[in-house]
Every structure is written in C-alpha cells, then in structure tokens.
Image (cartoon, rainbow, N blue to C red):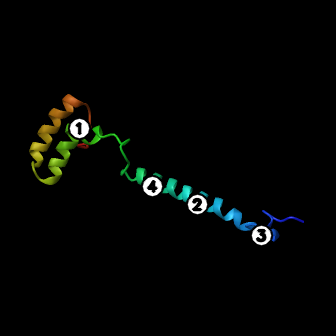
Amino acid sequence: MQTLAHFGDGGPGPWILFFPVIWALVIAGGITLLRRTVRRGRGGPWRPAAADDSPITVLGHRFASGEIDEDEYWRRLSVLDERFGGTGKGGAA
C-alpha cells in the first residue's frame, strides 16, 4: 500500500502537508496584522486626510494645546458652525 507521497520510497511523506500549513499561517497572520493596523487608525494611504484638516478640528486642537482660551474657542466655533455645518453643542468633531 502506498502512503502519502511515497513515504516508504524516500519521498517527503506526511511532511509535505507542513509547508501549506505554514503558508496558510503566514497569510492569516498578515491579514490579521493588516486589519488591526487599519482598525487602530494607522492605515496607509487609503485613509482620508481631509478629516483631520477641517477648520473645526484645527480649532479643537488649538484649544486643547492651550493656544486659545475657552471664550475664544466658543466664539470661533459659533462662526465655523454657521459656515461649515452643525457640530451641535458638544464642541469640535
């Protein structure tokens, strides 16, 4: 009776199945790594850059870094809110 890949005749035997399993694990690991990277927001060039460049977001960053005070933040936000659309009462983005 012949075994898998002629094991008794000097062939690789059941070890021939080891290499496809290794390739499957490498591919699955790559896909998992890619999905985790994209999910955490460190995606590649397909990530939209315009979301971080909106004036309301820039204003929020300036307020958070201490460049402007709270009164100036709310005054500028009300102007931007009229011009660029509603952010609601919750603040920037």
The amino acid sitting under disc 1 is Ser
Measured Cα–Cα span from mark 4 to mark 1: 26 Å
Write down the residue under mark 3: 10
The amino acid sitting under disc 3 is Gly
- The quarter of the picture where the C terminus appears is top left
Disc on the earlier residue, 3 or 4: 3
Give residue 82's mark.
none
Measured Cα–Cα span from mark 2 to mark 4: 16 Å
Write down the residue under mark 1: 54
Write down the residue under mark 2: 25
Q: Disc 2 vs disc 4: which is toward the camera?
A: 2
Task: State the residue at coordinates (76%, 66%).
Answer: 11
Mark 2 touching mark 1, by CB under 8 A? no
Name the outermost residue toward the top: 83
Task: State the residue at coordinates (77%, 70%).
Answer: 10
Disc on the earlier residue, 2 or 3: 3
- The quarter of the picture where the N terminus appears is bottom right
Give residue 36's mark.
4
* Residue closer to the observer: 10 or 34: 10
Few, some or many residues within 10 Å of mark 1 (<14, 14–19, 20+): few
